[in-house]
Amino acid sequence: MKYGLLGKSLKHSYSKEIHELLGYYKYEYFEEDDLDRFFKRKDINGINVTIPYKEDVIKYLDEMSEDAKKIGCVNTIKFSDTIKGYNTDIDGMEYMISRIVDLKGKEVVILGDGATSKTAVECAKRLQARTIKVISRKGEHKFEDVHYYKNCDVLINATPVGMYPNNLKSVIKLGKIRPKAVFDVIYNPNKTSILMDCDRLKIPNDNGLRMLVYQAVKACEIFTSKKIDDDVVENIVQKIRTKNMNIALVGMPGSGKSTVAKIIAKNTDKELVDIDKIITERYGNINDIFAVQGEKYFRKIESEVLEEFSKEKNLVIATGGGAVTVKKNFYYLHQNSVVYWIDRPNSKLSRKNRPIYKTNTMREIRQNRNYLYRRFSDKYFNNYNAKKTAKLIVEDFNETIYY
Ligand SMILES: Nc1ncnc2c1ncn2[C@@H]1O[C@H](COP(=O)(O)OP(=O)(O)O)[C@@H](O)[C@H]1O
Ligand SMILES: O=C(O)C1=C[C@@H](OP(=O)(O)O)[C@@H](O)[C@H](O)C1
Ligand SMILES: [Mg+2]
């Protein structure tokens, strides 16, 4: 019995993890250049199909489901007496959307015109949207004209722009359009720049993880002829988020970020990334950097290191106390992290080896930064006792990533 995913570059896929959590079979990755060769294999029972083969596989099929025919894309194939293609992406998309908004009678704008966009169009039709506009780079309606649809109800990003490792790229700016709900089929990073802007503007949104898990569950049902509960979907979504998302700490210099982050890493399977430590390893002592090249240069390299690490997964990130003074660091951090502000009273803050306290008093720093710590963080904890703080943060993280 062989099950797996057919595609070209599958390093970052979550499919193996999802299917194996379902527990019915082992799941392999088939990275193939030659589809003729693959479809000659006799040992395959079921596969999922991903970029770039969702249309290319059609010629090898004996039958197709109605949805697959309508969309013209196949993401699931069952091999029995015949080879039958299905599209369960559309079911995943329906699940993702319908948890948040009823599409009936709504004006929908879809970004992109590739395979996922075709799925989104059929999904919007199935859910009885009033109007469906596809905008793309080269099509009839263009990304730069997105402002024509300023008052649309629902926006769906069906492009891969902004997907890891090209984090924070986006085909449109949300300011030009004010939908009432937004969906992004991307799930790595957890939040694309569009979704972070939605959070800021309190626009309901979801990323593509639920769609991904749900399409896998529907594929599994096809493979095994078993019915799987929606609870299982939510359970897997939570497990993947717990494993993939980061915990990031911000707060005053000397408030215990490095200490608490170390304890969290010890007590979870998350890897510790102390931004100051990496800067020291790469560029030398932080006191010397402040003394020789100055604070501005330090902020530049701090941002670069933060950008590099904060798009990775399953980390505990201890930031330096001044990370909040650079605006773009907000986006670096929030794409994959729940951000915690930890604090201690001024009298308890450590000054040792902290060049920032040479040029500014503690009061000044607090005055300049407290509102930034508040703005940057999702939650606040008084770091009264480092072990306790670490424990409370992990508990909170496990609860809050479930949304
Ligand atoms: N809750 C706490 N109680 C007492 N000392 C603490 C606590 N948290 C951290 N410390 C101590 O404070 C100092 C600064 O901690 P550190 O983790 O380096 O802070 P930051 O990374 O925020 O600058 C260290 O000596 C650390 O052991
Ligand atoms: O607050 C700041 O401006 C700084 C805090 C330090 O990190 P800690 O907060 O870990 O002390 C370190 O990044 C650097 O000395 C600058
Ligand atoms: Mg530190």
Image (tube, rainbow, N blue to C red):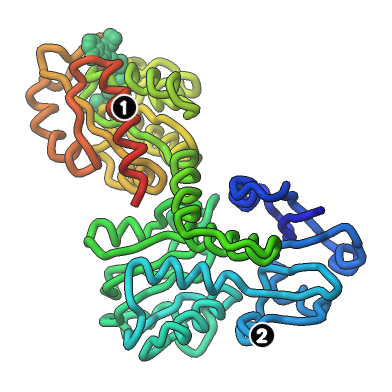
Tell me what residue is drawn at x 63 percent, y 61 percent. 226
Q: In this view, does 365 lie to the left or right of 40?
A: left
Q: What residue type is labelled 1?
A: Gly
Mark 1 surroundings within 10 Å by alpha-carbon count, few (fewer than 14), some (14 through 19), many (20 or more)? many
159 to 356, vertically: above or below: below
Q: Is mark 2 on a helix, strand or loop?
A: helix
Disc number placed over residue 390 in the picture, else none: none
* Closest to the observer, 327 or 310: 310
Q: Kindly indicate the quadrant of the structure image that contains residue 59.
A: bottom right
Look at mark 2 in the image and give the residue it sits on: 69
Whether residues under marks 2 and 1 lie with C-beta atoms below 8 angstroms apart, the answer is no
Above or below: residue 91 compared with residue 376: below
User: Quick check: which quadrant has ligand 2?
Assistant: top left
Any atom of ligand 2 within 8 Å of the CB at mark 1? yes
Badge 2 amino acid: Lys
| Residue at disc 1, secondary structure | loop
Q: Residue at 47% across / 84% down in the picture? A: 126
Q: Is residue 36 left or right of residue 336?
A: right
Residue 239 pos. (x, y %) = 48, 43
- Nearest the eye: 267 or 189: 267
Q: Earlier in the sequence, mark 2 or mark 1?
A: 2
Q: Residue 339 appears in which quarter of the rendering?
A: top left
The x, y position of residue 350, in whole percent, is 21, 12
Q: Which residue lies furthest to the front in this view?
A: 226
Q: Which of marks 2 and 1 is in front?
A: 2
Q: Where is residue 68 in the image (x, y as percent from the top left)?
A: 65, 80
Left or right of 324, for residue 302: right
Where does the image place residue 208, in percent across and percent down from the top left?
47, 61
Kindly identify which residue carries mark 1. 320
Q: Which residue is drawn at 73% across and 60% down?
A: 7
Structural distance between the alpha carbons of marks 2 and 1:
54 Å
Instruction: Name the outermost residue toward the top.
Output: 352
